[in-house]
Image (tube, grey):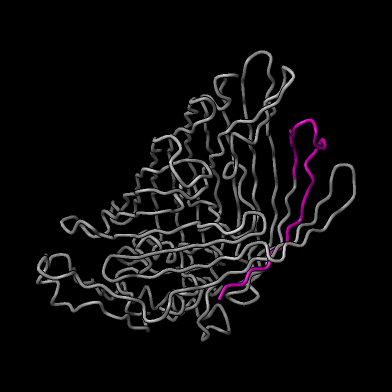
Amino acid sequence: MSGRSRPRRHTRAHSRLLIAASILACSATTAATTPHALRPAPEAPIPAFSRKYRTTCSTCHTAAPKLNVLGEAFRLNGYRFPENDALLRRDEPVPLGEDPWKDLWPRAIWPGELPAAVPLALRIQNDVQVSRGAAGGRSWSYRFPHEIYLLAGTTLGEGVAAFLELEWSRERGTQLVQAKLEFQDFLPILPPRALNLWVGLQNLYLFTFADRQIDRAARENFLWQQFRASDLELGGAGRGARSANEFQLRQSQPALELNGLAAAGRLFYAVGLAQGAGAQTADNNNHKDIYYKLRYKLGGLRLDGTYPPGGRPVTGGRGQLMDRSIILEHFGYAGAEPVARGSQDRHRAFGVNARTLYGPLDLGFGWMAARNENPWGPDSPGALSWSSLFGKAEVLFLPWLIGSLKLDYFTTDASAESDFTVTDADQTRVLPGLVLLVRQNVRAVVEGDLYASDAPPPQRDSRRPHSLWIRLDVAF
């Protein structure tokens, strides 16, 4: 079993990559010698990782939580810097066993490790919402705090990592958002990075494009990320009702996921079984949902964190690790939720997107479509289809200043019995924003939430109120 211990390939090209990343990160801030990192959401160097590796936020982030290309490679590699994390590592772990134990396996326990420091971090998120309705008037809402996160992440020896996210808000109380283990290269007979197993409550990351925890610089989600069949009201015949299906594509779920890299580190694939169950924690129909993800990257830093021969970081005087590449993504999801009297609402969704990174510019667009076969149950048979076109443009003006613009077109098409009517949720939004890094672990965001068109239920105003969001994040 000693074959599980693979020597790291400490090539000069890999060393130059991480050294260049560190130099670029340090030039992004005059406070680079203070090792703090902002992590308003999981899956990248949270402050616990910053303390462990003694590196700045800009090593892995353009503006946290938005990952740069090296940060994405770090995430996919089980919270390790690709190939040679020893270049940045300063805190030695506490060993749980000695290396010779590997040669004695299975007559000895395979050695692991514990982090030298407790791998905990906190994030406090404060929001101000300024809204104006169609009838006039303006309101200010202070959400101090809006959410508080307890974050923990660490490696547990060769090929094992753990992540935890606990969230508190005034509206929802305390919720466990993620708690998972990652087993990297768990079949040593396969090539490195070819097959990993992630187990636990986890965000499925069906798209990394504009995901709130990986690739979103400003505040708001796209509409399709948060839509539920229960958002639409069924009316008529002297009564009203809503679907019991509260499933959202963005929600965290208990899941088993196999993933890995292929095509010389250019292709990422994943397939998984998730519990579904809407907002519940226990399985509500003894049916497991299935999903898959594909991502391919042309040009720039490969998904395994290395450059091809002759490749190197793109420098542009902005103190950041930049890239010149095109990224293509596709996902599929199929599941079922109980809705009424033992009836099941089978649902499926598919999506594609294309994104280009060119120096300080991050530009992309996507399309997704979904269908619910029976969201209303046996008393009002019918189907629901919904789809979205969405895009974004983000520009790094300065190492601490990002401009953001998102476009969001969302449409629904619902049917039911002849004596029922179904409200729709067609909306078109424009979201301009500005992201300011006050410090590397203090982020300010101003984002508009403007509706070009909206089709709300009759009891609401004819147009959804436009809003201005102001957010202040701090993580430590």
Q: Is residue 193 above or below residue 462?
A: below
- Compared with 299, 309 (above or below) is below
Residue ID at (19%, 55%): 190
**Residue at x 45%, y 41% (from the top left corner):** 276
Query: Is residue 97 part of the magenta span, yes or no?
Result: no
Quarter assignment of residue 385: top right
Q: Residue furthest top?
A: 418
User: x, y percentage for residue 197?
Assistant: 30, 54
Q: Position of residue 67 (x, y in %)?
A: 50, 63
Q: Is residue 244 left or right of residue 274?
A: right
* Residue 402 found in image quarter: bottom right
Q: Quadrant of residue 293?
A: top left
In the image as oriented, which residue stretches furthest toward the right? 136
Task: Please indicate whether residue 68 sits to the left or right of residue 78 in the image.
Answer: right
How many numbered circles does the render carry? 0
* Viewer-nearest residue: 11 or 116: 116
**Residue, far front:** 341
Left or right, residue 416 beside residue 320: right
Question: Residue at horizontal 29%, vertical 60%?
Answer: 183
Residue 59 position, x and y percent, is 47, 73
Q: Position of residue 275 (x, y in %)?
A: 42, 42
Against 415, residue 333 (above or below) is below
In the image, the segment drawn in magenta is: 451-476
In the displayed structure, would residue 353 be above or below residue 242? below
Tell me what residue is drawn at x 45 percent, y 63 percent. 164
Depth check: 328 or 174 in front? 174
Please state, as top left, top right, bottom left or bottom right, where the N terminus lies in the image.
bottom left
- Which quadrant of the figure contains the C terminus? bottom right
Q: Is residue 456 magenta?
A: yes
- Residue 237 or residue 199, whichever sits in front: 237
